[in-house]
């Protein structure tokens, strides 16, 4: 039981960007703070690169290798459903990536978790395939923060040219939507991928700028 708790502590630290207080770890794991302090001392003695102390918070150094994670049934259901949603609504690249993830997941699961044949299904409408030729290039542009020139058709089929900063993609039931900062309109705009008539990923990178990020757009909703 304690071994599982030690792995859980490492998993929690790895998944958090900032310092994690002992009180939070104790609440998550259902133990006392004193137990967390003892566990931290044990992990440090085993060589785990943990920085911090009780009352301040703990941080796991980046790049530290962890053994295969253990998933409870609810966690595994969420992971599998997410992967199947990508397979149902993604483009060819995303579907192939999802298959690779399933293969890796099956390789690291414990014997009790091994079966991936769980009764969970995700279905995509046929119309959701429209605009998929832009999906992977736009995902790459978002990661690399490269501006994109769009030829976009509105509801009256009028096509306009937009220079954009691609910020995020959202999968709705029947369509993917690109959220971007439009430099023509000087504001956030949403573009349905099935209405993008042309696109060109430019070599121009855009910097992080307060007020013009995806998180800033979400705050306006």
Image (cartoon, rainbow, N blue to C red):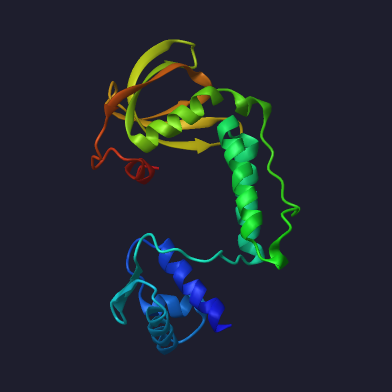
* The quadrant where residue 41 appears: bottom left
Question: If the image is split into quadrants, where does the C terminus sit?
Answer: top left
Q: Is residue 28 left or right of residue 83?
A: left
Q: Residue at x 69, y 63 (%)?
A: 113
Q: Residue at x 39, y 73 (%)?
A: 48
Q: Is residue 27 left or right of residue 209?
A: right
Q: Is residue 91 visible?
A: no
* The quadrant where residue 43 appears: bottom left
Which of these two is toward me, 126 or 4?
A: 4
Question: If the image is split into quadrants, where does the N terminus sit?
Answer: bottom right
> x%, y% of residue 61?
34, 65
Question: Please, is residue 115 above or below residue 197 in the view?
Answer: below
Q: Residue at x 43, y 83 (%)?
A: 39
Question: Please, is residue 140 above or below residue 133 in the view?
Answer: below
Which of these two is toward me, 149 or 141?
A: 141
Q: Residue furthest top?
A: 158
Q: Is residue 111 left or right of residue 213?
A: right
Question: Please, is residue 27 above or below residue 197 in the view?
Answer: below
> x%, y% of residue 66?
48, 65
């Amino acid at each position: 039981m304690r071994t599982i708790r030690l792995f859980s502590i490492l998993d929690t630290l790895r998944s958090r960007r900032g310092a994690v207080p002992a009180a939070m770890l104790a609440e998550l794991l259902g133990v006392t703070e004193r137990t967390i302090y003892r566990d931290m001392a044990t992990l440090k003695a085993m060589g785990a690169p943990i920085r911090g102390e009780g009352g301040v918070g703990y941080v796991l150094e980046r790049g530290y290798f962890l053994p295969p994670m253990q998933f409870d049934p609810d966690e595994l259901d969420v992971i599998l459903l997410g992967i199947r949603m990508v397979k149902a609504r993604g483009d060819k690249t995303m579907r192939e990536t999802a298959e690779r993830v399933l293969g890796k997941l099956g390789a690291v699961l414990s014997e009790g978790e091994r079966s991936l044949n769980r009764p969970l299904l995700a279905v995509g409408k046929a119309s959701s395939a429209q605009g998929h030729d832009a999906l992977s290039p736009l995902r790459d542009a978002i990661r690399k923060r490269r501006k994109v020139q769009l030829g976009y058709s509105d509801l009256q089929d009028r096509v306009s040219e937009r220079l954009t900063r691609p910020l995020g993609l959202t999968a709705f039931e029947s369509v993917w939507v690109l959220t971007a900062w439009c430099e023509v309109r000087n504001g956030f705009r949403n573009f349905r991928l099935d209405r993008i008539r042309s696109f060109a990923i430019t070599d121009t990178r855009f910097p992080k700028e307060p007020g013009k990020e995806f998180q800033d757009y979400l705050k306006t909703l």
